[in-house]
Image (tube, coloured by chain):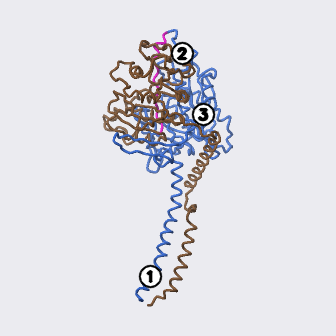
Amino acid sequence: MPKRRDILAIVLIVLPWTLLITVWHQSAIAPLLAIRKDDGVEGKREAGGQAQDSKEYCASDKDIVEVVRTEYVYTRPPPWSDVLPTIHIITPTYSRPVQKAELTRLANTFLHVPNLHWILVEDSQRRTPLVTRLLRETGLNFTHLNVETPRNYKLRGEARDPRIPRGTMQRNLALRWLRETFNANSSQAGIVYFADDDNTYSLELFEEMRSTRKVSVWPVAFVGGLRYESPKVNAAGKVYGWKTVFDPHRPFAIDMAGFAINLRLILFKPQAYFKLRGVKGGYQESSLLRELVTLNDLEPKAANCTKILVWHTRTEKPVLVNEGKKGFTDPNVEI
Amino acid sequence: MKLKLKTVFVLYFMVSLLGLVYALMQLGQRCDCSEHDLPKDRTISRLRGELHRLQEQMRKSDVTKQPQKQPAKPTIFVITPTYARLVQKAELTRLSQTFLHVPQLHWIVVEDSPHKTPLVTDLLVKSGLTYTHLHMPTAKDRKLQEGDPRDNQQGVIYFADDDNTYSLQIFEEMRSTQRVSVWPVGLVGGMKYERPVVEGGKVVRFHTGWRPSRPFPMDMAGFAVSLKLVLANPEACFDGEAPMGFLESSFLQGLVTMDELEPKADNCSKVLVWHTRTEKPKMKREEALQAQGLGSDRAVEV
């Protein structure tokens, strides 16, 4: 009888403790689970299969992978945030048959990026109706400027004179506009990025550049005759050189699409512009950056410059042979 | 030692009860870890909160804009054949960015490859789109595979090459397709645009500079077919052996006649899609380096 009582006693002692321990264990995990669930909801676009209402069929007989999501997609730009720094995108553009197509798909990309301000600068005497209408219809936050490159500096037809960089005057005008519009003392956080209208940009790129303190850099695909060009980053996370074949000894051997500048730095150094005359091919970027920053100040992004988030794509010039000399199609139809 | 059951039991019971109550109070409450956070983590959680707030704001404003439950829009099935080459990832990236703006869109990506490549698989997973990932070693006979089309599901099928440019309006134009709808395509056929000529609301001929005698002298990007029509004609497919420029005709001939075509884009007077082509990137230096065994890191996906 006493043995039984002892056993009973021991059981009654141990039971509440085991209960307590399991409950305590649960309570330690639950807050972590709550946080992770939030990650799943916010990172909807990235983490596959964590969103609500998503089904995934894996490796059926036909080896089809099908994913059904019931997410909402939007066409207007995301609402403006008071917290995120504004990204000012400077795009020089000029009239040619593919212009509307390029600007259309660029706009489709930009419509996903919060706090984006598009500064589109036309190489023309007057702002064209095509661009004016396009900008208005996108619903993006934009500034429409124009400046015509004098004939001497324009690229003539097919013959490329490498000493005359295209888009320089337009980019400089945009920089001047920024300096006239924003006060150096204002607290408006901003990042400046030069985006040509024929490149391809991933959405991740814009979030990488948002944390730029001075000048940030990353790799660019399809430039310099390579799969990609990239800054060289050492173990301490500092840029010490350039992984390029074409003139790696340039002060900044990087493509226009490979860096972003903090707006404060632009305003702080109001004399820094792209050099217009006497610039060797490939040195245009250096002509601006060397007035703003040293190699040591550069901030490497894209996982220490190991991921490609921007591609220097170029669009083929369409063959318009069937238009003939007088033009076959109705010129009133805008393309 | 003899255990005094009663006192020990009471003691442990009290302790356990207190512990249980305390634990239950802790449940459901987020742990306050702020003292362990680095400033970076604080910024991250602040930005995350901001993102969450903005998404809520967006959802709320859209709920108020659509108070009644509208009938389900017809789904647009976009079929994109693709193949591995340098610019593939870039093309699919910017294509997905356009498609993300179009509601009720189902992207069917068909790889010209014996296996599904990780590049396309990862891209599709991260895209946030509704998709079906297929692969075929040769895209000779492009048969349509719908996966699981539901019986009375309204849908439209559109063939979208991965290097073209699409405005968002074209998708809304094609959504109302009953049989086959058509519209102009920019920068194709050696001209600024090709288009069907519309008179009295019907297509009477085609304005094209290249082989206008074809049954349907238009580009793949210039028409869309209703799902119902395709399912009703299971034999209809593209003839891979057809002469150049006749691919579209080989498919449409079995489905529709010219006067049944539905003109869109303001009676085919607006260009809402462009047949852009991307240059092949110059790889001379890369090839030279590879010959020396100093090519760029293959682990970096381009």
Compared to residue A37, the image places residue B233 above or below, namely above
Location of the N terminus of chain B by quadrant is bottom left
Q: Amino acid at mark 1?
A: Ile
Residue under pointer 1 = A10
Q: Amino acid at mark 3?
A: Trp
Q: CA distance from mark 2 to mark 3?
A: 38 Å
Q: Amino acid at mark 2?
A: Val
The answer to which of B205 and B129 lies nearer the viewer is B205
Look at the numbered disc 2 and give the secondary structure of its residue. strand
Look at the numbered disc 1 and give the secondary structure of its residue. helix
Compared to residue A28, the image places residue B95 above or below, namely above
Residue under pointer 3 = A118
Chain for colour blue: A
Going 67% across and 41% down the picture, which residue do you hit? Answer: A184
In the picture, the disc for residue B198 is 2
Q: Residues within 10 Å of mark 1 (few under 14, many from 20)?
A: some
Q: Quadrant of residue B248?
A: top left
Q: Tell me how many marks there are.
A: 3
Q: Nearer the viewer, mark 3 or mark 1?
A: 1
Magenta: main secondary structure equals loop
Q: Are marks 2 and 3 in contact (CB under 8 Å)?
A: no
Q: From which residue to which does the magenta span run? A: A309-324
In the rendering, at what x and y percent does residue B50 appear? 60, 49
Q: Are marks 2 and 1 in contact (CB under 8 Å)?
A: no
Q: Quadrant of residue B15?
A: bottom right
In the rendering, at what x and y percent does residue A298 appear? 52, 44
Chain B colour as displayed: brown
Q: CA distance from mark 2 to mark 1?
A: 92 Å
Compared to residue B170, the image places residue A84 above or below, namely below
In the rendering, at what x and y percent does residue B213 appear? 42, 12
* A314 magenta-colored: yes
Q: In screen coordinates, is A112 left or right of B227?
A: right
